Every structure is written in C-alpha cells, then in structure tokens.
Image: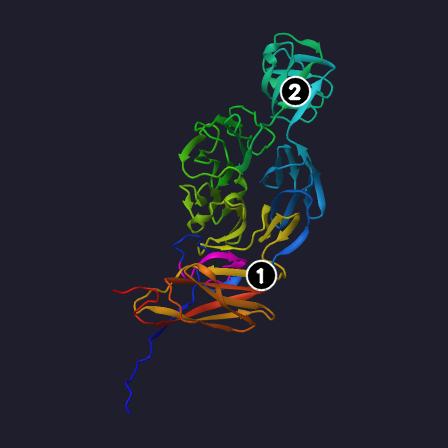
Amino acid sequence: MKLPYVKGAGKTTGVMTAFGALNTNESAGENEFICMTNLSGHAYPYLATRRGRKKERSLASPGTLIGYADELIVIDDGKVYMGNEILAEISHGEKKTALMGALLLIWPDRIEINLKNGEVRRLENRIEVSGKIRVSQSSLSGEDSDTGTFIKIAADGIGHGFRAWDGVEIDGLEEEGLNGAHILYAVEENFLIVPGIQAASFEQAGGVVVERKCPDMDFIAVQGNRVWGCSGEKHEIYASKLGDASNWRAFAGTAADSYAATAAAAGDFTGAAAVNDTVVFFQEDGFHKVLGTKPANFQIVHTPANGVMKGCEKSLCMLDGCLYYMGRNGVYAYDGALPVKVSRALDMWKLKDGCAGAAGNLYRLSCRDENGNGHMLVFDVQTGLWHREDDIKAQAFASAGGKMYFAADGALYQADCGEEKFEWECVTGRMALDLPGHKYLSRITVECETDRGAKIAVSVRYDDKGPWEKEMVSYGRRSVTLNLREKRASFARIRLRGTGSCRIYSIARGLQAGSEILPGKRYE
C-alpha cells in the first residue's frame, strides 16, 4: 500500500547575536529589554552582568564627594576628609563645592582649603573696632602727608585678616563720605590705606566695621580662574575677582575685577556648571550662558531650552567635552550649543531626583521614577546604550584616579571593583510571532558563559498574559535550550535570570509553521 507523502512542517531559526539595552517604551525590539536588573554593557555587543562593587567604609551623614587627581575627598558628619586625614571641620548639611586649582571651596560655609598644604582660610572677614580710630591724609606707605592721595584709617587690629586689593565695606565713620565700598591699596595689622582726599584729620571712639563679604549663592562653578555663582532670591549672577575666591566686591576698573549682574529671564536657578570655555546657569526651561573674557565684555545670553530639573543639580557631569544632566523630560547632553536628549529609551519611567557621576566613558545616574522606585542607571556615551544595575539610591558621586565612587545607604562604595554575588534578570521586548505561514515558537536556545556555580534560568510568556512558562534552569552550561509546546500568540517575551557572573552571546529561537486555521478563531 502506498501512502501519500506528507511534507513536514516548515521550520526556521532566528538568532540574536547583538544585544541592545534597556528600553522602557512600547516600541522595544526583541533584542532590547523592557526591564533589567544588574546587567551591564561592558561586553557589548554581548549582554553581561555588571561588575561588582567594593564597600570602602561606613559613613555617618555624607554630604559631598570630590575627586582631586588621584585623591578622594569626603565631607561626612561635619568633617572634610582626604584619605584618613581631617582637613577641616565645618557645619552639617548640604554643601556646594568647587575646585580652583588646589583650592577646595565650600559653600555656604565660605571657606577655602588648600589641598597642597592643608591651610584653611575663611573667605569672609569682619573687624569691628571698639577703641580709638584715627583718619588722616597719607601716602601709600602710610605716612601722614598733606599732599598724599590716600586716606589712612588707623586702629588697633583693624587690618587683621585683610590683604592689599581686597574689596571691603566700611561703615560707622563719622565722615559719611568715607563709608561704603573701598579697595584696600595697602594693609597692615593696625591700619588700612584707601584712595581718596580727606580735608582734615579726625579721631573717633570705636563704632567702625570693616567687612569683606561673599554673596549668598545657590550654586557655584569655576571657570576662567574665577568662581561663579548665582542667587535665586536676588536673581543675580556673580563672579569673584580673578584668581581670588574671597573678593566679590573688588571694582577697580581692571580686567581682574569682580562681576555682578541681574539675570533677565524669570524662574529659579536649578544648577550651574562650566562648559568648555563658558559658564552656564540653568533653569528648568532654559539657561543663561556667560560670554566674554573680562568684566568689561561679559555678556549674559539666555537660551530657552530644556534645562536642569529642580533638585537635580547633582546630575550635572562633564564627560568627553559634553555636559550631561537630568531635565524635566529626560537626560540631556549639552556641548555649548543646544541640549540633545539621550534618554528616549527611558521615557516611560518619568525620572526625577537625579544624582550622577562620570568616569571613563560612563555616565552613572541614580534616580527615582514617578512611582518612587529607585534606579541606578549607566549610560555608555560611545554606544549610546542604557543599562540598569539595581535600586540603590546614591547621595553623591565622585571620580578619582579614574575610579568611580558613590555614597549610598550609609557607606562609601567603589563601582566596578571587587567580588560581589547578586541576582540578575532581564525581559526582552516584543518578539513577533504572528508571521506569514502562521508560525509559532517551538524552541529557545541561549548560548552563554557563566562562572562556576552560577545559575541561569530561561522562560517565556505570551501576549503579556498569564505566568511565565516552562522555566529551564542550568548551572554552568554554555548552552541552555527550552523546548516549547505549540501555542499561538501575537508575540512572546523571553525572561533571563540568574545568580552569579554571566555573559550571554546569543539567543536563538526556533519557529515552526502551523495550520492556517488559528485556534479559537471562527471562519465563515
């Protein structure tokens, strides 16, 4: 008896050997991942678990981390540490810091720490004289002279803490015309010299205050050997005297003068940063860029654009000539022209509360989504891919000696260093199954490499309904195959998860043609 020849069902295979990264949007492709934990792009185009972290030490109440060459500076519990050495004791609370050469500037404490010799200096100085004060016409050297063009103000200790060319405010002199802003041309412990003409010498008993003040500033940055800052309350932008962070009211008509101006656009300041040869002050809906080389030609140009989200000033980081930061609609890269969004893959999460650090070619961002879930995200500026590590929330980042450090959960960590065992997981985007020929998924094969004792598990889910099906668990194998029963669906997702270090080289899927009549569908 001859039986009719029946042709076997057609089978095809698709292989993914290049993996994308995190994509929270509906459009996530089959080689991308809608959710991810403890994975990294360091093995791109393969998918790999992240490198471990190393706990350096415990912290009481970390405020700021600063990288200075190969040294890490930690502000913790009101103390400034470099290594195990305490450089200074300051007030508790959040700090704004900036480095100007070897000088560490700390606001609102208004102190300057020389990181070479450990010297600590108060940027402000105030002397209140209670004893006898004598005011007379003098020469620059301080000798009384009727033909001199300077005024000498003499009293015990009046010059303590001041230096020549400081810009100061003097108040309390009986000669009203001598009160106000002055530049100190010469200073000794017991007298000050300021320019001017005084008709007659006089003496008075105390009541005089001489003060060198720094403005209240919300954010600071260093650019062009000046410290820059801004005040949201006064809506003003300031620059210190050239090379001198203690002088903000030195107006002598030179290129080294201090600078102050009112910002025209409404809105609170949300951050400040030096970007290449300019300094930029951000708002949520724009930014002010300062152009020019000296006070005489400084210009403030406002650009309406996506600025820094309020509360995300710690997300500002320079990396490869670009400034990266979190705005209201995502993460942006700004090279001095216009900001460009680099986080479209994260749009579904609506991120906020950003704090970031940069080292090598990685921008590491700690933030929360609109539901309050924490995310430690890593953006590779070379590949343009985002990966998610875990839900740890960092309060500060710093890069020192090419290493990334962050403070979180009462401890100081070094990233991408050390031995650490953790669980990892990822879920792919939609894998279309409703193909010509009515094919269905019949097999999944994962080629991988795991450390000894590591575990990997593979499972599948159809049409985002029901539980994950037929999970295959493997220990230390290079190939994991999941054979599936016939099930018609529009699409499927693959879930990979495990424990220990793993690198995934490819995911192959087997498709088999089925009947043209779909189950559950009525044909007339």
Type of the residue with mark 2: Val
Question: Label 1 neighbourhood size at 10 Å, few (<14), some (14-19), many (20+)?
Answer: some
**Residue 124 located within the stretch drawn in magenta:** no
Note whether residue 390 is visible.
Answer: yes
Q: Position of residue 353 (x, y in %)?
A: 53, 42
Magenta residues (range): 29-44
Q: Position of residue 307 (x, y in %)?
A: 45, 38
Does residue 67 sit above or below 385 in this rendering?
A: above
Q: Residue furthest top?
A: 200
Note whether residue 358 is visible.
Answer: no
Which residue is under mark 1?
423
Camera-side residue of 338 and 277? 338
On-image quarter of the N terminus: bottom left
Residue 210 marker: 2
Camera-side residue of 46 and 423? 423
Q: Position of residue 144 (x, y in %)?
A: 67, 14
| x 50%, y 67%: residue | 458
Mark with earlier residue (1, 2): 2
Q: Secondary structure at mark 1?
A: strand
Q: Secondary structure at mark 2?
A: strand
Circle 1/circle 2 CB separation < 8 Å: no
Q: Position of residue 68 (x, y in %)?
A: 61, 46
Type of the residue with mark 1: Glu
